[in-house]
Amino acid sequence: MNSPRPVYLDYAATTPVDPEVVAVMNACLTDSGTFGNPSSTHVHGLAAAARVSAARAQVAALIGATPEEIIFTSGATEANNLAILGYARANADRGRHLVSVRTEHKSVLDALRQLTREGFTVTWITPGDGGVVEPAALAAALRPDTMLVSVMYANNETGVLQDITALAAVCRARGIAFHSDAAQAAGKVPLDVRECGADLLSFTAHKLYGPKGVGALYVRKDTHAFLQPLTFGGGQERGLRPGTLPTHQLAGFGAACELARHGLGAETARLALLGARLWAGLAALGGVHLNGAAAPRLPGILNVSFEGVQGESLVAGLTGIAVSTGAACDSDSPEPSYVLRALGRDRQLAESSLRFSLGRSTSESEVDRAIEAVREVLAGLRAWSPGTVAGDDLPSAWVTELAGGTGRTLRGEGGGAGEDSWVRFQLLVAGDTVKDARFKAFGCPHTMSTAAWVCAQLPGRRRTALIPGTPQEWSQAQRVPVEKLGRLFAIEDALRACLAQWP
Ligand SMILES: *Cc1c(COP(=O)(O)O)cnc(C)c1O
């Protein structure tokens, strides 16, 4: 109850709203503020419209666009959908082929999948080992009927940056439109749409210390980037995104963009130092890998894989820090991160990866607390892992017993390296009775706790009734969710293997 709030290292999932931004938003809400409908033509409406214009200019300035090129949306998810669905549907006569990358955000992947149901074809590029999409790989994926390419600027899981200037140039040379999801990059690294040459670019307020529920799509005005709206209703946002403009959200977004633009250089340098400090501390723990290490990356994101520990157990143990495993929106999926698999990580390493993302309030002492928290949990889990030979020696009482000639030891394993679970039991038996038992386990928290519970039942049991019940019964006693039941079979297998050695 009284434990301190965990250190927040999940700024890539969302950021707190800057207090200055909150003040700006508050001034747009009440009777005394600019609460009017920006579409109304009376004084209240005109004041709100002026507030929206100012915000639009601030948002445009962050990415070097003109205010007319900004279409406000509910966030980057909607901006990605509007860009991809809106462009493809409006320009289907130019071709029905699109190109994107396997490591994109779900809102790009799923919008493209929707297009495949509408008769479009998508070619998926797998990035190279470091996570980078080479311009040559993009060029090779283009076809005469390619009409749109979508490549994110900064990856939300690994922070890997793509050279969108080079990729956009490949597209421009062939008259193909280029979209980039810049939700993680905007406000974090310099971004100028004139320089990078993107035709469409998405970003969102809540990743840069603005409010949730508002974002923008940049639509280059001097190109063929004609879009079809996704919703219908009014003339707002040039008919591309009708609906009453949320003045407070837009004012907050604008203020957040302005703060980000002014603080960018200093903040980037500060985060790079903190990130280096975090990595130095984690690397010293041994058996850790920085994903995307060879590629240019955002300064604030470190995606790290830990050898020899199971991801769920790692996260369950890390109560002192708020971090994410892979993408936050994906945490209910049993599949290991598709982004890390696409980077060539094996299943265990992809599963045992954490994304540390640092932000404006992150301090050196928080980084140090995070390193310490990981060190403790990692040491604990590794000490219990059958893969770690050290610490697997027989207890001295057993050695004495064995020297006395009355006992013998049995050793059995279930599951194995590279599998979901790996359990080892060592039993000291005398005659037909278990005198003592030890276990090692690699697996989810349920596997660990059930193995411990079963192990505690073993002393005193006889050869004819060694196994205390069935995995089904254990799962009920330990309240293990049914979908995890399969993992407990490794425990039973390990005991069976012990039995097989018992003469
Ligand atoms: C957060 C994020 C999104 C989604 O943005 P919302 O505003 O939450 O809809 C899209 N793409 C990337 C890369 C993101 O990090």
Image: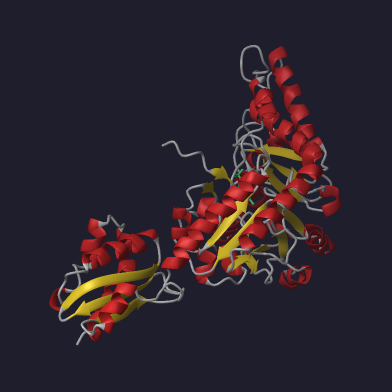
Q: Residue at x 74, y 73 (%)?
A: 140
Vertical comparison of 473 with 199: above or below: below
Give coordinates of residue 129: x percent, y percent.
67, 72
Instruction: Tell me if 215 is positioned left or right of 447 in this view.
Output: right
Give coordinates of residue 414: x percent, y percent.
34, 76
Q: Residue at x 43, y 72 (%)?
A: 391
Vertical comparison of 329 with 293: above or below: above
**Which picture quadrant has residue 32?**
top right
Q: Nearer the viewer, residue 17 or 102?
A: 17
Q: Residue at x 51, y 63 (%)?
A: 352
Where, quadrant-wise, is the C terminus in this rendering? Answer: bottom left
Instruction: Tell me if 256 is positioned left or right of 312 in this view.
Output: right
**Which picture quadrant has residue 233?**
top right
Give coordinates of residue 385: x percent, y percent.
43, 69
Instruction: Tell me if 228 is positioned left or right of 399 in this view.
Output: right
**Which picture quadrant has residue 138?**
bottom right
Where, quadrant-wise, is the N terminus in this rendering? Answer: top left
Q: Is residue 269 visible?
A: yes
Give coordinates of residue 87: x percent, y percent.
69, 51
Vertical comparison of 436 with 93: above or below: below
Q: Residue at x 25, y 64 (%)?
A: 456
